[in-house]
Image: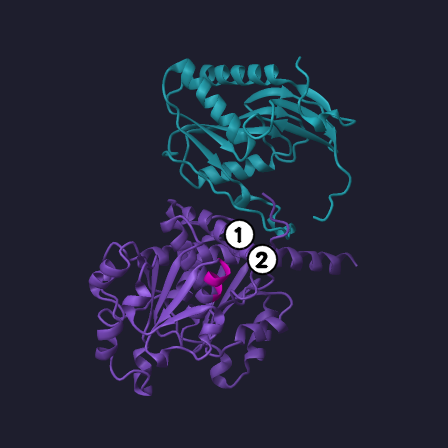
Chain colours: A cyan, B purple
Amino acid sequence: MTEPKKQAAEKEGWVRVLDSDEVRRAITRIAHEIIERNKGAQSLAVVGVRTRGEHLAERIAKMIEGIENMTIPRGVVDITLYRDDIAHNPEQPLVRGTELPFNVDKKAIILVDDVLFTGRTIRAAIDAIIDYGRPRSVQLAVLCDRGHRELPIRADYVGKNLSSSKQEVVEVCLSESDDEDAVYIRPSRKPKEGA
Amino acid sequence: MSSTDLKIGPHLLGIRGLSREQVEFILATAAQFVEVSERPIKRVPTLRGKTVVNLFLEASTRTRTSFEIAAKRLSADAVNIGAKDSSVTKGETLLDTVWTLQAMAPDVIVMRHPSSGAAHFIAQHLTRSAVVNAGDGLHEHPTQALLDALTIKQKLGKLTGLKIVLVGDVFRGRVARSNIFLHTLLGNEVRAVAPPTFIPPDLAQLGVKLYHDLPSALDGADVVMSLRIKTEYLQDAFIPSTDEYCRRFCITEPILAKYAPESIVLAPGPFNRGIEMSSEVVDGPRSQISKQVNYGVAVRMAVIYLLAIRQGAMNLSEHLKEHSA
């Protein structure tokens, strides 16, 4: 195990549950499972949920391409316009846009996110995808499943199942946006300042 | 990216009063909405259950339609009220009309009115609805300036350090005024060229450079905005004749090619071919007119979205407070 680079991790209460090798192995295994379950990579498309799901989707798509020696279409969904809590939140979030630059119809879509928690994000992401067409199937791949579902949603491919309390926060770090690949569990910060 | 210090609202009454960051935030949001109109299903569920009233007390087809389509693509319910349908024609005051509307709990009221300041006036009296100014008298038309800015940004890739020329009726131009506020805010050079009767007396105080001949105004311009000569006012003798106006100020391809070869041309519409611009310009590659219509829907979606989610959440928390007490 390498030393955690993230300074915050040295703070009290942070527990690292996956290091960079474990993240890599989880992604490799998920890629293989996807190919196995779909009997190849024909008609697959990999779609990440912004922002960290986007990076994971890219990694999974690349790995599938390497194994199957073909190109896989990929896309990104931004769920801002599909959230179910918008009526309760006076904040004006930045809309970042959905990009699905392929025909969704009849594709087997692998939806990728970093953490599966309440399931509300995934519900929103599925609605967003279906506005673009009628996929043959939508399958869900997540790096971590932390439980506490509020909707009847489950993942088809899971990097690691975590047992966490609802008050804890699961932090996924990926080298594309953070300075390392790792997953931490930390206590929630006390009341949000200013927000 | 944090947007917590970038709150837009509660109303959008004009470009004046917005910060540069707020303008950029609205444009960034609008840029994302462009794609929604290109989907097979041109609708997102975001504002389900929200109501947008389009109160247009002055004739308008394109702006009203644009706001209506924008509201519907966000899944809001859009209700249109024109001057002929409203009780204003029966002698009701504007405030009474607006209070009646508010009792029906719209989240957003989009208003066009022939009097300057009308949108500010109703906004002062409304506590549960966001107001969008869709043109008030000679004053402002903020969403038009924002959609012009989005058009420029998408085409030229930037929105600062540009030379922008307004040609035509600046005097009766609320579009001109909103654009002047916007582009001086963003650090662009704003020029105006027209017969002196079309130039308001204190225009230079807004930071606009005045010209009286087209070639020198166009010299090196990046963006040319053509403002409509309102032919219905011609009897007011602002100009001797459209022919004479056209000889001196009509935007033609040879003039653009000579003095502003890299320029793009915008017109808020409607426009008169052969008076403000030649047909060659209107239909030519510089013209961004159809893009403006396209981006107009996206900008209005962004404005309605930003104001409605804020207003809606505030109304909901009031509602919950009342019912838990």
Which residue is painted at 44% across and 18% down in the image? Answer: A64
Name the residue beneath numbered marker 1.
Answer: B25
Q: Chain of mark 2?
A: B
- The range drawn in magenta is B181-186
Q: Is B313 in the magenta? A: no
Secondary structure character of the magenta stretch overall: helix
> Disc number at residue B8?
2
Q: Position of residue B7 (x, y in %)?
A: 61, 55
Residue A28 or residue A142, whichever sits in front: A28
* Secondary structure found at label 2: loop
**Relative to A39, does residue A73 appear above or below in the rendering?**
below
Front-lying residue, B127 or B2 = B2
Q: Identify the element where label 1 is drawn.
A: helix
Tell me the amino acid under the disc marked 2: Ile
The disc at residue B270 is none
Q: Is residue A58 left or right of residue B215?
A: right
* Residue nearest the observer in this picture, A190 or A138: A190
Q: Position of residue B323 (x, y in %)?
A: 74, 58
Residue B324 location, quadrant: bottom right
Q: Are marks 2 and 1 on the same chain?
A: yes
Placement of A92 over or under B68, stated as above or below: above
In this rendering, the answer to whether A179 lies above or below B25 is: above
Instruction: Note whether residue B76 is visible.
Output: no
Between the C-alphas of marks 2 and 1, the distance is: 9 Å
Q: Give the amino acid type for the residue marked by disc 1 in the picture.
A: Phe
